[in-house]
Image (cartoon, rainbow, N blue to C red):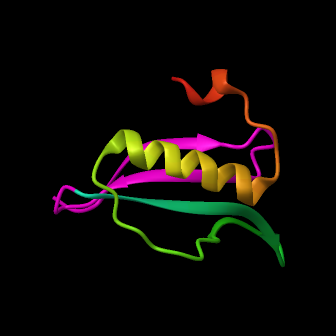
Amino acid sequence: MREQVVREYFSPSKQYKVQIIKRKDGLYTTEVYRWMEDCGYEFWSSINHEFSLINSEEHARKIGIEQLKECSRENLSINVLND
């Protein structure tokens, strides 16, 4: 089994997202992306500046949501994040 995206959350503008990733060793990590448009191409570009290993999905979710808030600078609705 390789890394697996177990959850994905988007900012209200849909310009940012965070993925909660379960690694093959059972630990979790997060990856933050920004939607980019450049020279006619549209794609998600990773904007992570730090890497951390997290011991539970719930803890990874909390960290990911904080990273999403920080990167997007948008107010995130708790209803959107509690799925």
Q: Does residue 54 sit above or below 83 in this rendering?
A: below
x, y percent for residue 22: 30, 54
Q: Is residue 14 left or right of residue 24?
A: right
Q: Does residue 81 sit above or below 68 in this rendering?
A: above
- Which residue sits at x=82%, y=45%? 74
- Which residue sits at x=26%, y=60%? 23
Q: Does residue 27 sit above or below 10 in this rendering?
A: below
Q: Is residue 26 left or right of residue 61?
A: left
The residue range painted magenta reads: 1-26
Q: Is residue 25 magenta?
A: yes
Residue in the foreground of this view, choosing between 40 and 34: 34
Q: Is residue 12 magenta?
A: yes
Q: Is residue 30 left or right of residue 18?
A: left
Q: Is residue 78 left or right of residue 39?
A: left
- Which residue sits at x=58%, y=71%? 48
Residue in the foreground of this view, choosing between 27 and 18: 27
The quadrant in which residue 43 appears is: bottom right
x, y percent for residue 80: 64, 27
Q: How many numbered circles does the render carry?
A: 0
- Which residue sits at x=72%, y=56%? 70
Instruction: Indicate the quadrant containing the N terminus: top left, top right, bottom left or bottom right.
Output: bottom left
